[in-house]
Image (spheres, grey):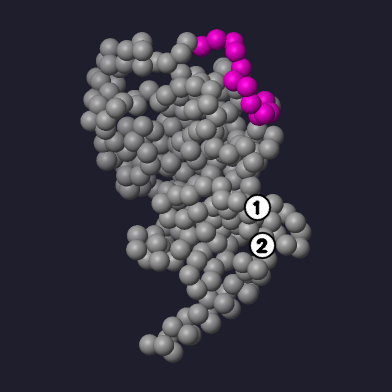
Amino acid sequence: MAEKEEKSKTKEKAEAARKGWSIADFEIGRPLGRGKFGRVYLAREVKSKYIVALKVIFKEQIEKYNIYHQLKREMEIQTSLNHPNILRLYGWFHDEERVFMILEYAHGGELFKELRKCGYLSERKAATYVASLANALAYCHEKDVIHRDIKPENLLLDHEGRLKIADFGWSVQSRIKRHTMCGTLDYLAPEMVENKAHDYAVDNWTLGILCYEFLYGAPPFEAESQRDTFRRWEAFGQGLFKEAVSSEDLGAPLDNQECKSNGRLH
């Protein structure tokens, strides 16, 4: 048993060496955030001094939640994508206990935080983000990649305010319809909610949901409980959505005021 574990460790070290990365190649800085399966740190590559975000996932968590194939698929998909509005995954490596993902650093953080700070966005800024997101999704769909979890928490902003799609954990590359129900309730497309087969159109639905949220401050089907959210869904399906959503739920009215930020409009 001990011999088998030793061979496994030797194999892991050899694979990391072939890729050319190890934890010794980075200076680790402050934490940027944490999720269910790992943490993200600000880091600097020692030789080039290039700033990146280093996502650290413990192998114990990978085994516990059985996400090996999901993580492998995420890394393969994200490394293959190269678009100005998609967060780059430069590479990955691992040691005996952890898997490290070397990600592009988005200085502006989550778009979710900007929305919470401002309440809602101006039409001009909302249009900028929607156009950027639409371009990035069109690029993904041309490559048969479906993200399946587009939401403000998974949209980041770089130092110029440019939007970046992140977190491809639920993404899939496929030309056929899929059946796995995944994503976040408030942003799910009808076919997801009804447990029907789906394709890239689920991302396009979410684009519309986000357009609404950018302008009004909350997604259209958001409610205090999942049960109430599904009631709104039912009302929408019956053409009664206007009656299901009160004027108070729509948030603040639109005006010409910009939400102040350091973001670049382009």
In front here: 99 or 240? 99
Residue at 68 percent across and 38 percent down: it is: 159
- Report helix, strand or loop for mark 2: strand
Residue 98 shows in this picture:
yes
According to the image, label 2 marks what residue?
26
Q: Is residue 263 rendered magenta in the image?
A: yes
Most extreme residue toward the front is 30
Res 17 quadrant in image: bottom right
Q: Is residue 133 above or below residue 241?
A: below
Residue at 58 percent across and 78 percent down: it is: 14
In front here: 174 or 233? 233
Type of amino acid under label 2: Phe
Q: Is residue 239 above or below residue 161?
A: above
Point out which mark residue 52 bears: 1
Q: Earlier in the sequence, mark 1 or mark 2?
A: 2
Counting from the top left corner in percent of width and height, residue 50 is at 72, 54
Q: Are marks 1 and 2 in contact (CB under 8 Å)?
A: yes
Most extreme residue toward the right is 48
Counting from the top left corner in percent of width and height, residue 125 is at 60, 22
Q: Residues within 10 Å of mark 2 (few under 14, many from 20)?
A: some
Instruction: Give the overall secondary structure of the magenta segment.
Output: loop
Q: Is residue 207 above or below residue 31?
A: above
Q: Is residue 250 above or below residue 190?
A: above
Type of amino acid under label 1: Val
Q: Residues within 10 Å of mark 1 (few under 14, many from 20)?
A: many
Residue at 43 percent across and 27 percent down: it is: 209
Q: Is residue 196 rendered magenta in the image?
A: no
Res 164 quadrant in image: top right
Point out which mark residue 87 bears: none
Tell me which segment is drawn in magenta.
254-265
Residue 79 shows in this picture:
no
